Amino acid sequence: MVINDRTMNDSLKTLLNLEEKSLCPVFGMIKKKVQRMTHTTSEYAYITLTNKGRLVIYRFDEHSSRAESYEFVTLTFGETSITQQGQYIVSLEFLTDTGSADVNFSFASVVKDKELPYQKRNADKMYKLLQKLTGEDAG
């Protein structure tokens, strides 16, 4: 499984709508719901915010992949934080057609052993945008 800037951008590009642009693609981990504790509780993910107010996620592991997206106009809860080790932690909740969806993910500004030259720039930008979108920068 190759994780690099090109595969990230190619994977996310196919999920964008017409005239939509990816603003800050990052590689991260996304929490997944599991039935049994023996399964992993997170997946790799390529994550970006778009100029059309969407969060776009491409989840993948060694066996499968799936895409999802959420519009920030449906955001009901959002919280961001940074750990002492520089890990960005994000918890969001969106209204959906079937109720609500919790989206919990993390990303780092530096990813060792991966060819992600823009990760730091994009991680910082994503964090700042998420703070604005969740209303956490109001003070």
Image: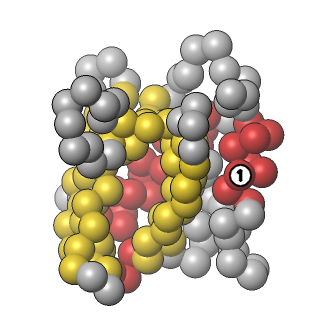
Vertical relation: 70 (above or below) 25 = below
Disc 1 marks a residue whose amino acid type is Ser
Vertical relation: 17 (above or below) 133 = below
Furthest toward the top, the residue is 113
Residue for point 44% across, 37% down: 43
Which residue in the structure is indicated by mark 1?
11
Q: Nearer the viewer, residue 115 or 131?
A: 115
Query: Residue 124's x, y, as percent?
Result: 49, 41
Binning the other alpha carbons within 10 Å of mark 1 as few (below 14), some (14 to 19) or many (20 upward) gives some
Residue 97 occupies quadrant: bottom left
Whether residue 117 appears in this view of the structure is no
Figure label count: 1
Q: Nearer the viewer, residue 63 or 72?
A: 63
Q: Quadrant of the N terminus?
A: top right
Determine whether, in the image, residue 32 is placed left or right of residue 127: left
Determine whether, in the image, residue 71 is placed left or right of residue 91: right
Residue 63 occupies quadrant: top right
Q: Nearer the viewer, residue 71 or 65?
A: 65
Query: Residue 135's x, y, as percent?
Result: 26, 66
Q: Quadrant of the C terminus?
A: bottom left
Whether residue 77 appears in this view of the structure is yes
Furthest toward the bottom, the residue is 97
Residue 8 occupies quadrant: top right
Determine whether, in the image, residue 114 is placed left or right of residue 91: right
Residue for point 74% across, 60% down: 13
Q: Nearer the viewer, residue 111 or 14?
A: 14
Residue for point 44% across, 58% down: 129
- Disc 1 on helix, strand or loop? helix
Vertical relation: 96 (above or below) 44 = below
Residue for point 32% across, 43% down: 31
Query: Residue 30's x, y, as percent?
Result: 39, 43
Query: Residue 74's x, y, as percent?
Result: 32, 81
